[in-house]
Amino acid sequence: MSHSTDQIRNVAIAGHGQTGKTTLFEHLLFAGGVIPRAETLESGKTTSDSSPEEIDRKISIHAAMGHVERSGVKINFFDTPGSSDFSGGVILSFRAAEFALLMVDGKSGVQIETVKLWRNLDGQGKPRGVFITKLDNDQADFSKVLADIKEKFKVDPVPITISMGAGGAFKGVIDVLHEKAYLLQGDALEKESPIPDEFKDALAAAREKLIEAAAEGDDALMEQYIEKGSLSPEEIKKGLIAALAENKYVPAFAGAPLKNAGVIPFIDFVADAAPNPKTAKDTMLNSEGKEQPVAIDPGKPLSALVIKTAYDQFSGKLSWIKIVTGKLAADSETINVTENKKERIGKLYTCQGKKLEEVKELFAGDIGIITKSATLKTSDTLAAADAGLTFVPLRLPEPVHSIAVNATAKKDDDKLGEFLVRAAEEDKTFRYHFNGETKETVISGMGELQINIILDKIKTNQKIEVETRVPKVAYRETITKKAGAEYTHKKQTGGHGQYGKVVLEVAPLPRGEKYQFVNAIFGGAIPKNYIPGVEKGVVEGMAHGTMAQYPVVDVEVKITDGKYHPVDSSELSFKLAARNAFRDAMRQANPTLLEPVMTLTVFVEEKYLGDVMSDLSGKRGKILGQDSAGGIAEIRAEVPQAELLRYSIDLRSITSGTGSFNVAFSHYAPISGRIADDVIKARETFKVQEADE
């Protein structure tokens, strides 16, 4: 059955690891009548964690999707991974959903990944709620966690459900919006019951806060609230819908999903008040490459974004798509705008975990799956016709951990490459490339765990043994003062000879300027048609510097004079002369090595702050600043890339696995002394080995 846009809700469930995302997802499907019983993580049979590696490790690795029907509304739920190693699944789910639900442990409160996810949602202005979970555990405290959220995020969450007790005294939850109590029933669904007298004051206080939030949704409602001091149930619902769509309040939910507590009132709220896709927008690139918002609108021609690519052993390639405008029908012709190719749509599906369910059409706002697509890949745009507009690609973080790999058996190298390419297609935070400069195959990802799982999968399924090592750093060379040189290339053979003389001056450029070529020839000392040959020679000379044969950067090269022969000169002669003149000039220009420096942002609990700062100092890091909020510290630093090749492992060790970080290239900086000597020595060894192969 297909659903119209206003009958659809999309919810991404996210949070720190071990906060119960998969458990809530499983119990939502059970409460919605989709599955006959809710399975536990330990059973290995949950709907969303279905891959062998997820079952084996008992963690979510891939984003999964399922849906339930409630009050005529279809609710698509995404279960996302908690580990930062698999953040790509969270990002694609946030892109596809109009509402995000952050799970927060009822005992631990806000944790590092919660902070990072919140900041991501702030960057998008996306509506979000919080589900305070595991309230049946000892030391869990609903009010205390609400206060923690208020302190750390500077928002005052609005309870939609409140807890009836906690720990051993936890009885269930009260639905503040509908004024109903739901009592625990063991393994069965929670049961609606009258509200116990002891919780009526708490309900009244929460109800008042709810009405205030609803009044924020509309000026007329605010006037009504100020005049009468209250709102009718219909006005409350109207206000909550409008205010949440504009991210004006954060709804909070209480529960213990493993015992089915708080699940039904959460589904009811999503069906009643969560943003429907018509309230949201996606973002496209126009013909000039500028971003422009696009409303999710069923009335316009088809456009859709591919949010995920997966491979299933039975169904083959699966392309997950979010319909943004119009509708997509099975057995139809479309255009892959990104590739400018026709895309024939065969069957269309939705899913419950890995189980596909065939549908005839999908309307704007819905999410579905195309199987065995010939051209589609993640972030591609699908449309009814090529209007020249494509959706902005998924905004994914840069990888933070890299290793060099090769197959133990040389004959398996090509096969290994094929499966690494496929892994990079399935998880866009994983990268695979051959570095021609260091002659290494390098894979990069969000952490050691992500990379190990991918390599273990290849080893198990394809029987390929893989060797790994720390990758080589791509150093650069530059000059620090002006210098000049001249070189005459002269070669006499039978017939025409070769002749070209060039006079060059080199000068350092500011860091990051790369290269500038200046033709300062006057009076025709070198004819114009040979100048391109001179520049080609300079570029070739810059490819291998004079210190350790690393590429040369940030140099201005000026040709000031030269000489030619009317018969023996050629472009080749001047290219060879310029290449040698450049190298002679560089040797006299006080050359120096440059190393890549990265911008590092580290997120740690405050108790680890001193240890992390000390470690960064030992890594030649320069601290740029730090912020702390509610026990979570953010450290910003610049650190040489050579010191960060194993940082994901180091940080995990320092912070007992709780810290995380982002890293991006910043600039190149000079190195000298023992560090430079070690780099040159290692490069010489590499060049000898390369020559022997």
Image (spheres, helix red, strand yellow):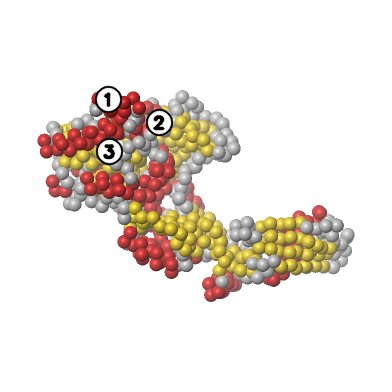
Q: Nearer the viewer, mark 2 or mark 3?
A: 3
* Numbered mark located on residue 227 in the image: 1
Q: Which residue is mark 2?
A: 279
**262 w.r.t. 681: above or below:** above
**688 w.r.t. 101: above or below:** below
Tell me, yes or no, whether the two marked residues, 1 and 2, touch with CB atoms within 8 Å: no
Disc nearer the start of the sequence (1/2):
1
| SS under mark 1 | helix
Q: State the CA–CA distance, disc 2 to disc 3.
A: 21 Å
Residue 48 x %, y %: 32, 44
Q: Residues within 10 Å of mark 2 (few under 14, many from 20)?
A: some
Q: Would you say 439 lies left or right of 244 here?
A: right
What residue type is disc 2 on?
Thr
In depth, the one of 309 and 501 nearer the eye is 501
Q: State the CA–CA distance, disc 1 to disc 2.
A: 29 Å
Q: State the CA–CA distance, disc 3 to disc 1.
A: 22 Å
| SS under mark 2 | helix
Residue 185 x %, y %: 15, 39
Q: Would you say 199 lies left or right of 59 here?
A: left
Q: Would you say 540 lies left or right of 594 here?
A: right
Residue 429 x %, y %: 45, 50
Q: Nearer the viewer, mark 1 or mark 2?
A: 1
What residue type is disc 1 on?
Glu
Residue 30 seen from this side: no
Q: Quadrant of the C terminus?
A: bottom right
What residue type is disc 3 on?
Val
* Numbered mark located on residue 158 in the image: 3
Disc nearer the start of the sequence (3/1):
3
- Tell me which residue sits at (35%, 62%) in the image: 609
